[in-house]
Image (spheres, rainbow, N blue to C red):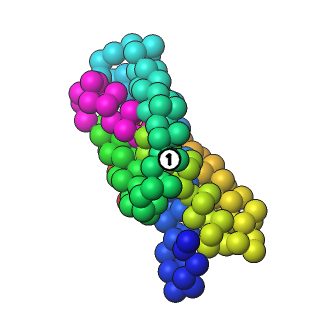
Amino acid sequence: MYKEKKNSWKLNYLAYAMYFITGVVCMQVGSNMSGLIELYQKPVETIALITSAFAAGRTLSVSIIGKLSERKDPLKILLIGTIFVLLYLLGIIIPAYDLALLFAFLGGIGMSCQDVLCPILLSNVNAKNYSSALSAGQALFGLGGFSISLLTGYMFRMGKPFYYSNLILSFAG
């Protein structure tokens, strides 16, 4: 599928960047809860629904993404998924709660793309060391979750808005 040696580093980077950024978005609501309550002027139980919208997008789309990736170019699907994840990461800082729900749903679809396609990319590019490659992806997922939490805490400590962490990490991914 994607065994070209000259592009293997690009494909690895794409998969690893997606693992990192999905780790960020999975932790962003919890890490940014107090900032989101202030931004949207809503109670915590309403803000928590953003995570539900993300989970709904992920749950409802993962099977569809799997089937679609067998018929269409998986890299194009992963690109669309990456865009959806970045839209969520950046869109959640717009002070419009209904849009946050929409962006969260799209982010969940984006994570489905990561769930389905990144293991396939890594297995094709790293056939001889797939377990190590997948483990590295999972480590980057964890690093993404750690990064948003750490950076958001730092932003709060410095008196900066929580969303600075989203902006910084969207460029890191």
**Does residue 138 appear anywhere in the picture?**
yes
Q: Left or right of 70: which side holds 170?
A: left
Give the farthest residue toward the front: 71
Residue found at x 62% / y 69%: 124
Residue found at x 52% / y 40%: 62
Q: Which residue is mark 1?
A: 67
Q: Please rate how many residues cluster around mark 1, counting C-alpha atoms within 10 Å: few if below 14, some from 14 to 19, many from 20.
A: few
Does the stretch in magenta take in 155? no
Q: Nearer the viewer, residue 101 or 120?
A: 120
- Where is residue 144 shown, x and y percent of the image? 55, 51
Give the farthest residue toward the bottom: 6
- Where is residue 160 shown, x and y percent of the image? 35, 42
**Does residue 159 appear anywhere in the picture?**
no
Q: Which residues are magenta?
A: 94-108
Q: Nearer the viewer, residue 127 or 49?
A: 127
User: In this rendering, is residue 34 above or below 112?
Assistant: above
Q: Secondary structure at mark 1?
A: helix
- Please state the total of marks drawn on the protein image: 1
Q: Left or right of 129: which side holds 71?
A: left
Residue found at x 47% / y 41%: 64
Q: Quadrant of residue 41?
A: top left
Does the stretch in magenta take in 98? yes
Amino acid bearing label 1: Lys
Q: Nearer the viewer, residue 32 or 17?
A: 17
Dominant secondary structure, magenta:
helix
Residue found at x 50% / y 80%: 7
Q: Left or right of 77: which side holds 120?
A: right
